[in-house]
């Protein structure tokens, strides 16, 4: 027995250009949500990182204020940390400056305790500001009471 196979050139083998284009469109439609999820998660991680830095900058300053000399405390309107005078400045408290893109401000207000005139309590507010990815200013404020007499 002799078998012979004949191949024709006009047989449909492989995919046509239209079939390939349809396959590519379907694949792109299936993959695009994955890229969108990665893009969104990258923005969320960036925002969380900025908030974490702001919390660290504020809490470092507040902790240093709690250890400052009692005589250094005085009323102070909202002042950028680089302009805070005397013993409450970041340099004197030995804390690092904030990263570029962040601003840290300090406000000190003496609490009026008319029933207890001998107490020296200050309301301290450390505010950290930065520009978010949309270009708007975001901020984090840490408040605390500090007893100058400790």
Image: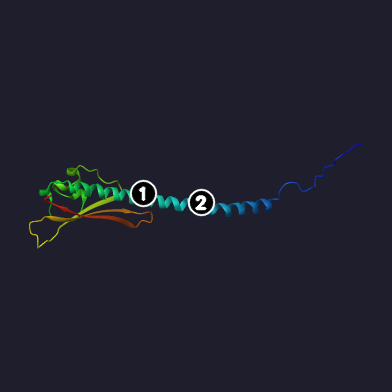
Image quadrant of residue 123?
A: bottom left
Q: Position of residue 10 (x, y in %)?
A: 80, 47
Give yes or no for contact between labels 2 and 1 (Cβ–Cβ under 8 Å). Answer: no
Specify the farthest residue to the left: 118
User: Reading the chain from its start, which is encountered first: label 2 or label 1?
Assistant: 2
Label 2 environment density (alpha carbons within 10 Å; few <14, some 14–19, many ≥20) = few
36 or 144, nearer to the observer = 144
Q: Position of residue 35 (x, y in %)?
A: 51, 51
Element under disc 1: helix
Quick check: 119 left or right of 135?
left
Task: Residue at 34% x, 50% y: name it.
Answer: 50
- Circle 1 residues within 10 Å: few <14, some 14–19, many ≥20: few
Residue position for label 1: 49
Color encoding of the figure: rainbow
Q: Is residue 101 visible?
A: no
Single out the mark in the foreground, 2 or 1.
1
Q: Which mark is residue 61?
A: none
- What residue is rendered at 40% in x and 50% in y? 45
Question: In the rendering, at what x and y percent does residue 128 appear?
Answer: 27, 53
Residue situated furthest right in the rendering: 1
Q: Residue furthest top?
A: 1
Which residue is found at the position 62% from the left and 51% from the top? Answer: 24
* Residue named by callout 2: 35
Of residues 17 and 40, the one nearer the viewer is 40
138 sits left or right of 68 in the view: right
In this orientation, does residue 88 appear?
yes
- Answer with the quarter of the image where residue 134 lies: bottom left
């Amino acid at each position: 027995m002799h078998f012979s196979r004949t191949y024709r050139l006009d047989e449909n083998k492989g995919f046509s250009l239209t079939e390939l284009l349809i396959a590519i469109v379907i694949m792109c439609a299936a993959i695009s949500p994955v890229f969108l999820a990665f893009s969104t998660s990258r923005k969320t991680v960036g925002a969380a990182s900025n908030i974490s830095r702001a919390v660290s900058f504020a809490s470092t300053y507040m902790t240093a204020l709690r250890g400052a000399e009692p005589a250094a405390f005085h009323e102070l309107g909202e002042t950028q940390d680089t302009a805070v005078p005397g013993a409450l400045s970041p340099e004197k408290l030995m804390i690092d400056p904030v990263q570029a893109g962040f601003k840290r401000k300090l406000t000190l207000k003496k609490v009026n305790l008319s029933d207890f005139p001998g107490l020296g309590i200050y309301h301290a507010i450390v505010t950290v500001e930065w520009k978010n990815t949309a270009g708007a200013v975001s901020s984090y404020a840490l408040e605390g009471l500090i007893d100058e007499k400790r």
